[in-house]
Image (tube, helix red, strand yellow):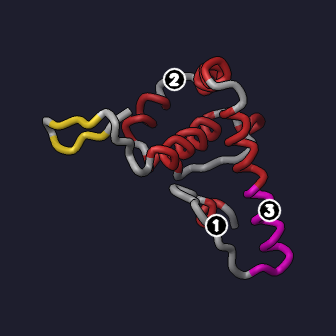
Amino acid sequence: MGLWCSRHCFCPCVKRADGTAMGVAKIRFIESMLPEDYQLFSDPYAGKFAPIGVCILSRTNAEKIINAWREKAPGIYQMLVGRTRWLDDVCRDAVKDGCEQLIILGAGYDTRPIRIN
């Protein structure tokens, strides 16, 4: 992974500042590609953050992508999806209990404020 500084200059040692946030947005997009009965959550906005990657992902079966994650990085996909669902539930419960403001630090490309009613 590296960063294109200009059209002709690629710096392989420099990572994109938003790489982690984009990766998690892709995970949320993949989870949203699953049939509704299998989704832990749905994020209709996640695909807007990584249009090129999402274009490629959308042409692939979500279960194949998840299986590739399981093979290459066991537990990472499940942890990220589980963490997203857990925090969604915590936020929903807080709002139901009367909380009027939530502050989520280090959220990156978090779409929770517009996904959760």
Q: What residue do we see at 58% from left, 24% from top?
A: 65
- Between residue 5 and residue 48, name the one nearer to us: 5
The amino acid type of the residue labelled 3 equals Val
**Label disc, if present, on residue 90 of the rendered structure:** 3
The amino acid type of the residue labelled 2 equals Thr
- Asked if disc 2 and disc 1 are in contact, CB closer than 8 Å, the reply is no
Q: CA distance from mark 3 to mark 1?
A: 12 Å
Q: Secondary structure at mark 3?
A: helix
Dot 3 or dot 1: first in sequence order is 3
Left or right of 19? Residue 88 is: right
Dot 3 or dot 2: first in sequence order is 2
**Label disc, if present, on residue 95 of the rendered structure:** none
Task: Identify residue for label 1.
Answer: 104
Q: Secondary structure at mark 1?
A: loop
- Between residue 112 and residue 3, name the one nearer to us: 3
Q: CA distance from mark 3 to mark 2?
A: 32 Å
Q: For the residue carrying disc 1, how many other residues have a C-alpha within 10 Å: few (<14), some (14-19), or many (20+)? A: few
The magenta stretch is: 87-99
- Residue 93 in the magenta stretch? The answer is yes
Task: Identify residue for label 2.
Answer: 60
Residue 114 placed where, x, y %?
59, 64
Q: Could you tell me how many numbered marks the image carries? A: 3
The amino acid type of the residue labelled 1 equals Ile
Dot 2 or dot 1: first in sequence order is 2
- Asked if disc 3 and disc 2 are in contact, CB closer than 8 Å, the reply is no
- Residue 74 in the magenta stretch? The answer is no
- Between residue 7 and residue 99, name the one nearer to us: 7
Residue 79 placed where, x, y %?
72, 39
Q: CA distance from mark 2 to mark 1?
A: 32 Å
